[in-house]
Every structure is written in structure tokens, then in C-alpha cells.
Image: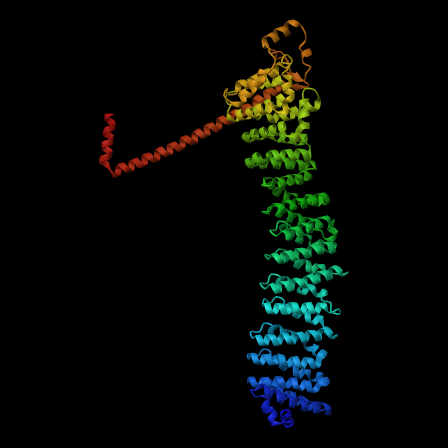
């Protein structure tokens, strides 16, 4: 009935021309239709207007024929123009069929749908807002249309809709955001441009709070930073920069949800995305540091690798952010998770980048200084990693590792644990001792007191069952003791071994473990000025002691005797009568050296400079002068008659007992060496026996294959 009524209102010629294939005829028909609707609107006959709209919708717009669709679209636009101010009450009928045409397969229909909606929007303006989400969705799809004309028409319509929205007070951002969030993950570049354009426009409207909804589409904007199109990257960056500026000026910002997004984006493979995310995090830490406390661990996880980024801009921002983050003091009550941050620092110690490893160690130091008790709870989790880090190729990393170790070792039980672990690591990895031993020991002596470190090491090595390792370790410690500038105070104390209690106690504490190496004992005695005991040790050396390793160590000692460390000893040679045993000990060492070696020539040259002296004459003068020997022993050092073995005690040191201790430990080494030699001999013999057996077996097999040849060989052997 409605259709019949509409047909009676519209001349047949108008209806016919409305579906004509020629645009001009359709346009003229639409103008006539506009006039008819105007008359009906003036008369207030909205029922007839509704009938006309239904006719255009069902008979034309929804028609499968393209020309009918085009006619229906231009007709609906004409009806709206005819209605003017009264069009709003009919929009529920007019707009849906136009929107439906946006998805028509015919590009010309889609084009005219854009044109129709444009004309409708111009008329109704703000009343149009009620359909915004549907229109936005349709425009979003048309922005990526395959037809350039449709795209152009959609852009024109898009600009008009933006103008309408910016001047409207009916727009609902709350209803729009879910749709925007859903579309933000679309990869099509045209759609992305469309979305960024809308975000920028809406953000420019004072009455629309886009910042409050930023977490809903922030991730999508970051996605666009890695787009292949330079223009899209630029637009997304511009939008993000504007939002960041708004955040700086805003008194209240919800950092939580955005922090999660930024942390994920900071680990992006795309350089530009990474830089932008790090920049945002940097600003967030400065602006809302306290609010970000629960996210410190997550932020740190991404910041530490960025400190070593190949891009300098990223490195600079990451380092600044790291410093800001470390400068904020927070506690567990605020959500500061010491365990999580410590775990991240521990993992980053395995980073391939030195700068990241260094900052991870700085974090460990910071945590130890501020949250020591909490850190020590997790000590077992990090200690092994810290010990492995002592093998790091970077000296700077190793030094920082030692600082962390030293900080942990402030407690006695942790100090012992550190030294035990350290010795264990040296035992497992001899190359660590060789390459980094000196650096590690010297630094620990500075950080933890040299005497304390050496006494603990000596105690551990005294009981060491691995005799080979004990010998190597003692030799290393001895060399460090004699040469390192950091141990000068310890050397000064050792020089007083025969004078005061502290020096004596140090000498005795080291002596027990130094017995694992004859050369270490000799060096220790020379430095402590226990020259007679040094000579006694030299005379006790047997064939097993004087091997290549011993001679290498002796060579080092001879060169050290020429260093400033032993200047006092060389000056004592100016008074050979007072330092008989020093002279005898040095001559003893000279006799052990190969004559063609450089060390032999160095020591012989030094001894040639000693004032002329006869051991026999000194002995005679002392025995006939009647002057007690003690009067001659005023230069420090343990001296005595060449043939006098009665002076076994000095400053409470029982040298006879010490000599027995040295002999006992060396017997263990000799036995160990003998067992090793026998084991190698047995192993070699077994190998040879297996080889002989295999050769015999092959010969027998060959004989079986060639009997005549075997027989001839047997005859030949008999003749021989």
C-alpha cells in the first residue's frame, strides 16, 4: 500500500529516469523528486514522505541492478535535501540503505553511495552523529578501496564527517573507542592513515578526552611506527609526540596500562619503535617514578639490553633512563620487588654486550647497598653466576664483580663462602687462575683487607687434597704477594716476622700452605729475612724438587731480587759479615741454576758486587773473638754461625718444627709424583701391549691368507 501511494505521488517518467543509465537523467529525476518532497514537507505529510523513502529503498537501493541502485542513492539524497531541517526524523530510514551500498560489488555504486551520504551529511550535520560508528566503520573499509575514484569520494566524505564531529556536542568518545581499538591492528596502509587521521582530529577537540583513552590505542600507534610507508611512520610519530606532550602537561595520568605496552615495544626489532618506546619510558620514569615501581623489573628487563644498542640515540636514552630508575629509592611496601630485579640483573650478566653486563652489576651493588637483607635471601641464586662472571673477558666487568663479591663478603660467613667458592673455581678452571688470578686476588685484597684474604686462602690451601693444584695456587699467591703494589702493607708486615708478634703470626699462617711449593717457601723466608731457614730449605731439596717447574719459579725469583721490592735485601749484601746466611742462601740458589741460563748470570753478577768475604775467616774470627753472636745480629734477619744449628727458635718461631712440616708436606708431593709416574707408565705399557696384540692378530690373519709366504718367513728366521 505504501508503495502504491508513493507511485501515485511520483510521476512515472521520474521513476523511469531515476534508473536510467545516463547520469544526467538520474540527476534531473532526483531534482524533481526533491521538489515533490519539499511540497510534502511543507504540508507536513510525513507518512507520504516515509512511503517515498520506502519505495526508493526497496525498489531501487536494494535492487540487484546497478542503475536502480544508483538511482535509489541519488533519490535518497534528494529526499534529504528536500526535507532540510525536518530530515532528522527520517534518518533511520535514509542512512542504513546508503551504508549498505558501501559494500556493493560495483565500484560505481560504492562511489554514488559516498556522494549520496556526503549530500545527506551536509544537510543534517550534527543529527548525523547518531550513526557515527557505522559511518566510521564503512569509511574505514572504503579508505582501502581498490577503486581510486571510490577512495577519492570516501576521502571527501571523511573530511566532511570530521568537520561535523569536531563541531558537535553529541559525539560519544566512550562508544567510539572500542571500535577504534578493534581497528588499530589492521595492517593496510590506507586504513592506518585513516585511523591516525581520526585520532589526531579527535585529540584536537578540547571537549574530547583522547588522552584518557590512550592506553586503548597506544599499542596500535606503536605498531604503525614500523610500517613500510614513511608517511605512515611520520604520522604515527607525530601523533605519539603530541600525546607525550599532553602527558607532560597533564596533572593526572594512568601510567600502569601504558607502561606494560611500552615495555613490550622497547624490545621491538624495529629501531624506530625501540627508540620511541625508550623515550616514552624515560619520560614516564621522570614524571611518575613512584607509580611505576611495580613495573621497575619489567622496565629494567628491556632497558639493560638497549644500553648496548647499535643505535647511539637509543643507547643515550636507555642509559639516562637507567640512571633515573636507579636513582629512585623505593621499598617493598611500594611494590618494589628486589628478587625480580636481582633476577634480571643476574640474567643480564650473561649478555653478549659488555655495557649491559656492567650496568647489571651496578644494579646488584645498588640493591646490596639499599636492600642488603633482602638480597642475601637470594644469595644462592646469584652467587654461582657471579663466580662465573669472574671469567668475563672484560677486566672492567671482573672488577665490578669483585666489588659485588666484596660487598656480600662483609659478613664473616659470606666472606668464607666467597673464598671457598673462589678457590673451587680456580681449581676447576686453571686458565681462570692463570689469566685472571692476579687481578682477582689483588682487587679482593683492596676491597676486603689483604691480610684477611691471604690468611683465609692459606687456611684453605693447607688442607687441600689436590696437591698439584695447591702447589700452583700457592705459587700464584706468592708471586702476587711479592709484586702487587696493593699488598705493600702485607709485605711490610712480613718483613717484621722476626721482630714482632703480628709479623710472626702472618709468617706462620702462610708457612703451612706455602710448604706446597719449595720455591714459595724460599721466597717467603727471604722476604721475612729468615735467611738461615731459607738456606736450610735449599739444602733439603732433592732431585724431585728441582724440576722444570721449580726452575721456572726460581728464574722469576732471581728477576724479582733485582726489583725495588727486594732493595732492602740487596743493601744487606753490603754487610756480608752480618748477613752470612743471606749470602749462603743466594749462593745455594746460584748452585741450583743452570750455568747458561739468564737467571744464573744475573745472580752471579749481583754476588760479584758483594764486598770480598771469606766464610772461613768469619767463622774463625767469631769463634776466637769471644763476642756473643747475638751482638752481630742487629740488622734484622735470622743469622748465626755457619756450623751452628742450635738456634732453632727466634721470636717464638720454632724453625726446626717448621722444617719438619715442610719435609712432611714435600714427602706427600714426592709420593704423589711417584704414583703419577707409575700410573702413566702402566697406562703407556698397557697401550703398547694392546698395539702389539693387535699387530700380532693382523699378522696371523695375513698368514692364514698366504701360507707359503708365512712359511718362508719362518725359515728365514730359523736361518738367522
- Coloring basis for residues: rainbow
In the rendered view of the protein, which quadrant contains the C terminus?
A: top left
Where is residue 603? Give x, y as percent: 56, 20
Residue drawn at (43%, 29%) of the image: 681
**Res 488 → quadrant:** top right
Residue that lies at the very extreme toward the top in this rendered image: 624
Question: Could you tell me if residue 284 is visible in this image?
Answer: yes
Question: Could you tell me if residue 528 is visible in this image?
Answer: no
- Above or below, 583 relative to 451: above
In the rendered view of the protein, which quadrant contains the N terminus?
A: bottom right
Where is residue 600? Give x, y as percent: 53, 20
**Res 96 → quadrant:** bottom right
- Above or below, 359 relative to 85: above
- Above or below, 236 relative to 680: below
Where is residue 587? Give x, y as percent: 56, 16
Where is residue 398? Give x, y as percent: 62, 40
Residue that lies at the very extreme toward the right in this rendered image: 251
Closer-to-camera residue (679/358): 358
Residue that lies at the very extreme toward the front in this rendered image: 24
Residue drawn at (72%, 65%) of the image: 212
Amino acid at each position: 500500500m505504501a508503495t502504491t501511494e508513493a507511485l501515485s505521488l511520483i510521476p512515472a517518467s521520474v521513476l523511469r529516469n531515476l534508473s536510467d543509465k545516463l547520469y544526467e537523467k538520474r540527476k534531473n529525476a532526483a531534482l524533481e523528486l526533491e521538489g515533490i518532497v519539499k511540497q510534502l514537507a511543507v504540508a507536513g505529510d510525513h507518512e507520504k514522505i516515509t512511503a517515498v523513502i520506502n519505495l526508493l529503498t526497496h525498489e531501487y537501493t536494494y535492487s540487484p541492478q546497478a542503475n536502480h541502485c544508483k538511482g535509489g542513492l541519488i533519490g535518497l539524497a534528494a529526499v534529504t535535501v528536500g526535507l532540510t531541517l525536518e530530515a532528522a526524523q527520517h534518518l533511520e530510514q535514509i542512512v542504513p540503505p546508503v551504508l549498505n551500498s558501501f559494500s556493493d560489488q560495483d565500484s560505481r555504486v560504492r562511489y554514488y553511495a559516498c556522494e549520496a551520504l556526503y549530500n545527506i551529511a551536509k544537510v543534517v550535520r550534527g543529527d548525523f552523529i547518531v550513526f557515527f560508528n557505522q559511518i566510521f566503520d564503512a569509511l574505514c573499509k572504503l579508505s582501502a578501496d581498490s577503486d581510486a575514484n571510490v577512495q577519492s569520494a570516501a576521502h571527501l566524505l571523511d573530511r566532511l564527517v570530521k568537520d561535523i564531529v569536531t563541531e558537535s556536542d553529541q559525539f560519544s568518545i566512550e562508544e567510539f573507542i572500542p571500535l577504534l581499538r578493534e581497528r588499530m591492528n589492521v595492517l593496510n596502509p590506507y586504513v592506518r592513515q585513516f585511523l591516525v587521521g581520526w585520532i589526531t582530529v579527535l585529540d584536537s577537540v578540547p571537549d574530547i578526552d583522547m588522552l584518557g583513552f590512550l592506553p586503548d590505542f597506544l599499542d596500535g600507534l606503536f605498531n604503525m611506527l614500523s610500517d613500510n610507508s614513511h608517511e605512515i611512520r611520520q604520522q604515527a610519530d607525530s601523533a605519539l609526540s603530541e600525546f607525550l606532550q599532553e602527558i607532560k602537561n597533564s596533572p593526572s595520568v594512568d601510567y600502569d596500562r601504558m607502561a606494560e605496552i611500552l615495555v613490550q615495544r622497547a624490545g621491538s626489532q624495529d629501531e624506530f619503535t625501540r627508540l620511541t618506546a625508550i623515550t616514552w619510558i624515560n619520560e614516564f620514569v621522570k614524571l611518575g617514578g613512584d607509580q611505576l615501581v611495580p613495573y621497575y623489573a619489567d622496565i629494567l628487563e628491556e632497558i639493560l639490553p638497549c644500553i648496548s644498542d647499535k643505535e647511539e640515540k637509543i643507547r643515550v636514552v636507555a642509559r639516562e633512563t637507567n640512571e633515573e630508575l636507579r636513582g629512585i629509592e623505593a621499598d617493598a611496601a611500594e611494590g618494589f620487588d628486589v628478587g625480580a630485579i636481582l633476577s634480571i640483573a643476574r640474567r643480564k650478566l650473561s649478555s653478549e654486550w659488555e655495557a649491559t653486563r656492567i650496568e647489571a652489576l651496578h644494579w646488584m651493588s645498588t640493591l646490596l647497598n639499599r636492600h642488603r637483607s633482602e638480597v642475601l635471601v637470594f644469595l644462592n641464586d646469584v652467587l654461582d653466576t657471579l663466580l662465573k662472571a669472574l671469567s668475563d673477558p672484560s677486566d672492567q666487568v671482573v672488577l665490578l664483580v669483585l666489588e659485588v663479591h666484596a660487598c656480600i663478603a662483609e659478613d664473616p660467613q659470606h666472606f668464607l663462602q666467597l673464598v671457598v667458592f673462589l678457590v673451587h673455581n680456580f681449581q676447576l678452571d686453571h686458565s681462570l687462575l692463570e689469566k685472571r688470578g692476579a687481578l682477582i686476588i689483588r682487587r679482593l685484597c683492596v676491597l676486603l683487607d689483604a691480610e684477611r684474604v691471604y690468611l683465609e686462602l692459606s687456611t684453605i690451601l693447607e688442607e687441600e687434597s689436590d696437591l698439584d693444584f695447591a702447589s700452583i695456587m700457592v705459587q700464584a699467591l706468592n708471586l702476587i704477594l711479592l709484586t702487587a703494589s696493593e699488598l705493600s702493607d702485607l709485605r711490610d708486615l712480613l718483613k717484621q716476622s722476626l721482630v714482632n708478634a703480628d709479623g710472626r703470626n702472618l709468617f706462620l699462617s702462610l708457612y703451612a700452605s706455602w710448604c706446597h711449593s719449595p720455591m714459595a717457601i724460599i721466597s717467603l723466608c727471604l722476604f721475612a729475612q729468615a735467611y738461615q731457614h731459607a738456606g736450610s730449605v735449599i739444602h733439603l731439596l732433592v732431585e724431585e724438587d728441582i724440576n722444570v717447574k721449580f726452575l721456572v719459579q726460581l728464574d722469576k725469583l732471581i728477576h724479582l731480587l733485582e726489583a725495588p721490592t727486594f732493595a732492602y735485601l740487596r743493601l744487606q749484601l753490603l754487610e756480608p759479615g752480618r748477613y752470612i746466611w743471606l749470602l749462603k742462601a743466594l749462593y745455594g740458589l746460584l748452585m741450583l741454576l743452570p750455568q747458561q741460563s739468564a737467571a744464573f748470570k744475573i745472580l752471579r753478577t749481583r754476588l760479584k758486587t758483594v764486598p770480598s768475604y771469606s766464610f772461613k775467616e768469619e767463622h774463625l774470627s767469631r769463634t776466637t773473638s769471644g763476642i756473643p753472636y747475638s751482638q752481630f745480629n742487629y740488622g734484622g734477619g735470622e743469622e748465626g754461625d755457619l756450623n751452628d744449628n742450635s738456634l732453632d727458635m727466634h721470636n717464638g718461631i720454632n724453625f726446626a718444627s717448621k722444617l719438619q712440616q715442610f719435609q712432611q708436606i714435600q714427602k706427600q708431593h714426592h709420593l704423589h709424583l711417584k704414583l703419577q709416574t707409575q700410573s702413566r707408565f702402566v697406562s703407556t705399557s698397557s697401550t703398547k701391549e694392546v698395539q702389539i696384540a693387535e699387530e700380532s692378530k693382523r699378522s696371523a690373519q695375513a698368514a692364514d691368507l698366504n701360507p707359503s709366504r708365512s712359511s718362508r718367513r719362518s725359515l728365514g728366521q730359523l736361518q738367522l
